[in-house]
Image: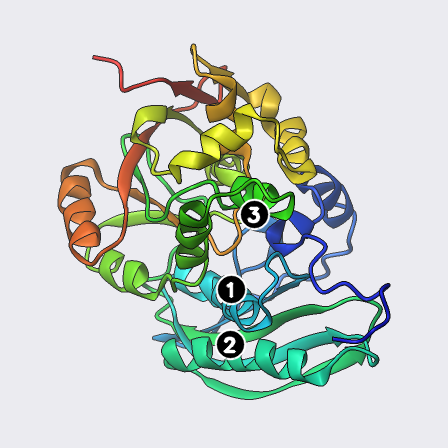
Amino acid sequence: MSENKELVFCRGGGCTAKLGPGILERVLSRLPKGERDPHLLIGYDSHDDAAVYQISDNLAVVQTLDFFPPMLDDPYTFGKVAAANALSDIYAMGGDVKTALNIVCFPEKMDLNILGAIMQGGAEKVQEAGGTLAGGHSIQDSEVKYGLSVMGFVDPHHMYANNTGQAGDVLILTKKLGVGLVCTANRVGEASKEAMTQAVDSMTTLNRTASEIMRRYPVHACTDVTGFGLLAHLHEMLDGKLAAEIYADQVPRIPEALEYADAFLLTAAAQRNRNHVGKQVRFADVPFAMEELLYDPQTSGGLLMAVQKEEAEALVRELQAAGLPAQAVGVLKAAADTEITVYPAKPR
């Protein structure tokens, strides 16, 4: 790395670097939308994970992009995480990855071997996804940022929006929460090696397997849980039309993440998430640490699926058999005065 002490590879990034959902919503709501293209099946107006554009009766293109500063000190691992995170939006829509383009911001005075390691990690994840790395764009910047623009295919008759769940659906989460808290603790030297290993393993795991499994079940809606945390992403799923119950004891988590929350090793992004949706959430005797976990911004987080109740147990079993820490974490309900209620455990 360069001797210039101003150039620090990891100051803290990942999905904690996202603009807060409240700020983003205010800006997007003011953009001119123009005449609606009937082939654009999903655009940004639905707060969804990616855009979907239909090109034939049975084929639609899925487009997304994501990039951010490093949240890890190892460039190669950061590249894998950033790529897995960008690829995830294709999987949340029920699509398959086809091509990807690198997005690179890099200081010219920094060691180019670092950039090579980042891009190697990203390229390996694109290959693992079955896609082709087809090029990209780079600019000189004062800090490192990396990600991908990704294109995939999906059957327009079998795609998943994030806001089409139905009352009675069971909510299934496929990855553990807590990577934001763990990475924050790691930056101040407080995270255990085991916690960091779990966080890195989670962030580098593609959502490909989870996506392919869910396509065999009556899933009505899906999103991936990233920078807005579980509760803000769930808020987008409800779309003012439904309510939800979450059962805290069922939420998969990195155990130490709760300890770090109790030690107030928190992120500003989690506070932004709380500020954005806190008025729509009621915690029924749930500890502060669990509240923070549910607001915690996730980098390359899991899929959150709304599946028909009768098939939920079988779907969880198949996801777990594939090695994923998936759990049924709650249910969708008819719209109510309180949008999201979090209980310590499922009421009897």
Image point 55% across, 44% down: which residue? 180
Give me the disc on residue 81: 1
**Mark 3 surroundings: few (<14), some (14-19) or many (≥20) residues within 10 A:** many
Kindly identify the amino acid type of the residue bearing the numbered disc 2: Gly
Whole-number angstrom distance, CA of label 1 to CA of label 2 = 8 Å
Give me the disc on residue 44: none
Residue 238 percent coordinates (x, y): 47, 35
Kindly identify the amino acid type of the residue bearing the numbered disc 1: Val
Question: In what element is the residue under mark 2?
Answer: helix
Q: How many marks?
A: 3
The residue that mark 2 highlights is 121
The residue that mark 3 highlights is 183
The first of marks 1 and 2 along the sequence is: 1
As displayed, is residue 161 above or below residue 192? below
One can see residue 233 in this view: no
The first of marks 3 and 2 along the sequence is: 2
One can see residue 239 in this view: yes
